[in-house]
Image (spheres, helix red, strand yellow):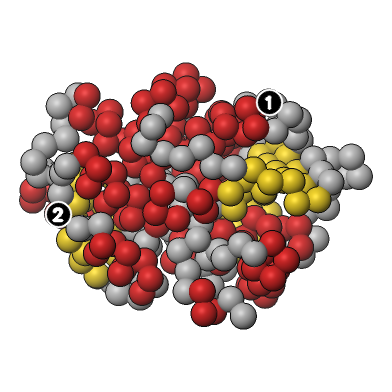
Amino acid sequence: MTVRIEDVQAAAERIAGRVRRTPVIEVAPGLTFKLELLQHTGSFKPRGAFNRLLLAKEAGRLTGQGIVAASGGNAGLAAAYAARELGVPARIFVPVNAPAPKVAKLRTLDADVVQVGNQYAEAYEAALIARDETDALLVHAFDQPEIVAGQGTIGLELLDQVAAFDTVLVAVGGGGLVAGIATALGTRANVIGVEPAEAPDLHRALRNGSPIDGPAGGVAADSLGARRLGNLAFEAATTHSIGSLLVEEDAIIAARRTLWHNHHLAVEHGAATAFAALTSAAYRPSPDEHVVVLICGANTDPTTLI
């Protein structure tokens, strides 16, 4: 199913009042940060989760069985938060090695947390079984039209908040975020997906001509470790000519430290990945180019920032 700009616009109306309009800051001439780490639950994910749940509620599909979701952490937090706000139960499957701060936060949101497997894909299989057994609503981490459209509302905000910009750098895991933003912006800006070299889902899919399974590890695996690009993201990548860049582990670690020491932004490794494209010179803007970097998540252990 294709996600259109009209879907993103409808999502913006639907989730208004449920999510924050996150700020932008110009940190240097020609460089702006979009601070989606200030969103509810510490990442951009509630946008898509609310859009998914509210559409299901309108259709009568959000029942007392509630929802199930699989996540490395952030998508589960968003789904649990949206479910609690709408008064339905949430059962969230996460890998056994999911970051402790994310698991603890999930429990504060009244979610039934089930830890299974070592990667997102294993948690997802367990969530599918639970959906089939209970008829709960499945909230996918990235590959549902409602999720992509919800994440795309960030792009609409950027058009309102920044007078003119040329390029948006976006971290990519399963691709729901980059797909939504590219759909929202269309031809008005270049959208470039930035991935860890250890988890190159978008890069692999573009090279292969379709999404393909592959290894997904590294320091950002808890948020960017989907192992396979979503079908909707691949469609958006080909329709909107989304670019692809890879950054190395040490570049992500260094970018995260720079965000803390220079800008006082405490972020997880996945959220530092887009910025790493600039700090490592994997992306070199032209002299007059205005770049927006999406800072997408803050769910990290702050003691590791030093």
The residue at the point 41 percent across, 39 percent down is 19
Measured in 3D between alpha carbons, the distance from the residue under mark 2 to the one under mark 1, in whole angstroms, is 41 Å
> How far across and down, in percent of the image, does residue 136 sit?
14, 44
Above or below residue 239? Residue 136 is: below
| Residue nearer the viewer, 210 or 167 | 167
Q: Would residue 163 appear left or right of 39 to someone viewing this image? A: right
**Residue 161 shows in this picture:** yes
Observer-nearest residue: 19 or 142?
Answer: 19
* Neighbour tally class for label 1: few under 14, some 14-19, many 20 plus, Cα within 10 Å: few
Q: Say left or right for 279 vs 260.
A: right
Number of numbered tags placed on the structure image: 2
Q: Secondary structure at mark 1?
A: loop
Residue 227: give x, y in percent of width and height.
45, 60
Residue 130 numbered tag: 2
Helix, strand, or loop for circle 2? Answer: helix
Above or below 273: residue 159: above
* Residue drawn at 76 percent across, 57 percent down: 278
Q: Which residue is mark 1?
A: 187
In this view of the protein, can residue 170 be seen by the observer? no
Q: Is residue 80 left or right of residue 154?
A: left
Q: Amino acid at mark 1?
A: Thr
Residue at the image point whose x is 36% and y is 66% from the top:
102
Q: Residues within 10 Å of mark 2 (few under 14, many from 20)?
A: some
Labels 2 & 1 near each other (Cβ < 8 A): no
| Front residue (pair 127, 108) | 108
Q: Position of residue 83 (x, y in %)?
A: 23, 45
Image quarter hosting the N terminus:
top left
Residue type at tag 2? Ala
Quarter of the image with the C terminus is bottom right
Q: Nearer the viewer, residue 257 or 20?
A: 20
Left or right, 253 with respect to 18, comes to right
- Picture disc at residue 113: none
